[in-house]
């Protein structure tokens, strides 16, 4: 194991691991490839350029970029210099970026041509400290670059590679990720140089069993904690190759990479898997090279996993992680999968389920999920109250509710703020949703609590049907009643064309609650 009493720089760590793989392909994106040697050289050039531009250690650089080779170069180059990259969601508004620029006090921005317009709007709205803006693939911009925006590659080629990595320690700030919370302003989770090391050593290598022969492809983007592990930390820690995709992970776009690039491991989310299985152009088993898939972001219904396995012969390994813990800490394993559950704690992490009194609950009882492990973030930047609430000593409060069975498997029971109490009994929205999704006509479902005339909470489900299929309200109610305890069936069902979701694909039940509160 690495000695963290000595200087440790995560970028340098990855470069050291791959010294013998210089000619091997590290990344393939929409416009070309990048070898391990090229990755190291360009990241070191970028590191030198940041320091030469007057950006100091621990100052922040905002990464507003689609998934492409330049994203990885920028992220690792910043870390190599001891500068802190702040990776942000590319689907946000200018107002969101303006907030983040002010909140993280970024000294520079690295973006790409397709996002120049929204970045410019953010700069106009923010009281920022940005002195440099570099643009990858400026030809993607709809118009000429504004005066302050400088093409990245020509500038990069002018730099000499930085000879030595910054002498950071394992506990030094390495990068930030903003949480994709359902409510309020996003929270800046500050991660260390050591944190991604631990996710690779505890999960990527021993649980997923990734190796240098793998080709990894993640639907979750690099700016997500999940995507960062899938498409950077894990593959680069074992010398694997990675496929990057700038566009949205639609079924068509995903299938094209599956058949053209032949990834062996695919990282997705339940909503994506459901959409692909329902799509008319779903490839045949013999058209792809998938040996295994991973799922996170929300609990994976057993029915989806089983259908996928039947079609492709590949298991979906379901787990749960968080922005705060950086990656997955509770997971099934390729050789130990119980569909419908989230598996068991990843070795190296401790998990507890606690009741409202703060004490551990018995098997079979729903409790709040707490985690302890070495990849936890240091804090939320400039948010002391929320930091205290979430980071409780060595333990982290996840905000998820789970139940553990007698065999030690954990099953998701909803978010702490989404749990419903019907007739004095907790009802898990996810349990009802996953049951509805077993109906052949149902693509997606979301369950919330609504108040009846007597002020009592009843369950209501919003349902999206598969293309060309339909079901009646009475039919779906009966379907659930036959499979769950009677009190759990949705009293009301509304059919909709789509469900509101976060950028990570999580259903935003609070949006549905807001909709219910408005007069109709």
Image (tube, rainbow, N blue to C red):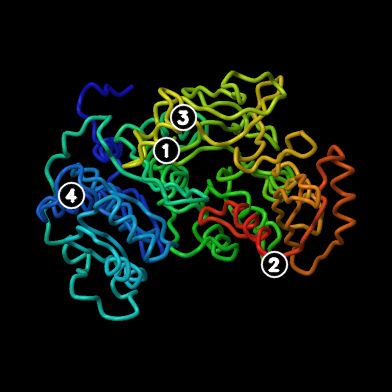
Mark 3 vs mark 1: give the one in front: 1
Mark 3 vs mark 4: give the one in front: 3
Q: Could you say which disc has been placed on residue 497 in the image? A: 2
Dot 2: few (<14), some (14–19), or many (≥20) neighbours within 10 Å? few
Q: Secondary structure at mark 4?
A: helix
Q: Secondary structure at mark 1?
A: helix
Mark 4 or mark 2: which comes first in sequence? 4
Which residue is tagged 1? 386
Mark 3 or mark 1: which comes first in sequence? 1
Q: Residue at x 60, y 27 (%)?
A: 344
Is 359 drawn above or below residue 496 in the view shown?
Answer: above
Which residue is tagged 4? 47
Which residue is tagged 3? 396
Mark 3 or mark 4: which comes first in sequence? 4
Mark 4 vs mark 2: give the one in front: 2
Mark 1 or mark 4: which comes first in sequence? 4
Q: Secondary structure at mark 2?
A: loop
* The N terminus: image quadrant: top left
């Amino acid at each position: 194991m690495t000695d963290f009493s000595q200087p440790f720089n995560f970028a340098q760590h990855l470069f050291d691991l791959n010294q013998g793989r210089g000619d091997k392909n590290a990344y393939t994106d929409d416009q070309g490839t990048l070898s391990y040697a090229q990755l190291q050289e360009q990241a070191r050039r970028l590191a030198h350029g940041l320091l030469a531009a007057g950006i100091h250690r621990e100052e922040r650089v905002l990464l507003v970029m689609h998934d492409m080779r330049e994203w990885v170069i920028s992220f690792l180059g910043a870390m190599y210099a001891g500068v802190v990259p702040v990776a942000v969601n590319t689907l946000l508004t200018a107002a969101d970026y303006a907030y983040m620029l002010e909140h993280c006090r970024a000294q520079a921005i690295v973006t790409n041509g397709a996002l120049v317009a929204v970045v410019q709007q953010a700069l106009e709205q923010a009281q920022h400290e940005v002195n440099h803006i570099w643009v990858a693939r400026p030809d993607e911009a709809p118009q000429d670059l504004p005066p302050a925006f400088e093409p990245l590659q020509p500038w990069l080629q002018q730099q000499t590679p930085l000879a030595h990595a910054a002498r950071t320690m394992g506990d030094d700030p390495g990068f930030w990720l903003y949480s994709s919370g359902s409510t309020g302003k996003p929270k800046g989770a500050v991660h260390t140089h050591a944190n991604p090391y631990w996710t690779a050593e505890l999960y990527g290598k021993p649980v997923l069993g990734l190796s240098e022969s793998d080709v990894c492809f993640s639907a979750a983007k690099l700016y997500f904690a999940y995507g960062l592990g899938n498409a950077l930390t894990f593959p680069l820690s074992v010398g694997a190759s990675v496929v990057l995709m700038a566009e949205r992970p639609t079924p068509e776009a995903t299938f094209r990479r599956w058949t053209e690039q032949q990834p062996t491991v695919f990282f997705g989310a339940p909503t994506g898997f459901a959409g692909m299985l329902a799509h008319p152009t779903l490839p045949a088993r013999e058209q792809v090279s998938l040996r295994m898939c991973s799922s996170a972001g929300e609990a994976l219904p057993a029915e989806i996993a089983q259908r996928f396995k039947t079609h492709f012969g590949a298991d979906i390994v379901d787990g749960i992680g968080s922005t705060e813990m950086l990656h997955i800490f509770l997971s099934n394993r390729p050789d130990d999968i119980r569909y419908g559950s989230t598996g068991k704690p990843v070795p190296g992490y401790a998990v507890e389920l606690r009741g409202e009194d703060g004490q551990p609950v018995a098997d079979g009882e729903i409790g709040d999920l707490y985690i302890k492990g070495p990849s936890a973030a240091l804090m939320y930047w400039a948010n002391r109250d929320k930091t205290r609430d979430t980071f409780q000593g060595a333990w982290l409060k996840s905000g998820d509710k789970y139940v553990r069975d007698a065999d030690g498997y954990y099953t998701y029971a909803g978010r702490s703020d989404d749990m419903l109490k019907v007739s004095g009994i907790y009802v898990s929205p996810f349990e009802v949703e996953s049951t509805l999704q077993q109906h052949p006509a149902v693509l997606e479902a979301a369950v919330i609590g609504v108040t009846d005339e007597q002020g009592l909470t009843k369950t209501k489900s919003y349902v999206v049907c598969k293309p060309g299929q339909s079901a009646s309200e009475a039919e779906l109610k009966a379907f659930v009643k036959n499979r769950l305890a009677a009190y759990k069936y949705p009293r009301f069902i509304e059919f909709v064309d789509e469900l509101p979701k976060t950028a990570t694909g999580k259903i935003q039940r609070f949006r549905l609650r807001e909709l219910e509160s408005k007069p109709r």
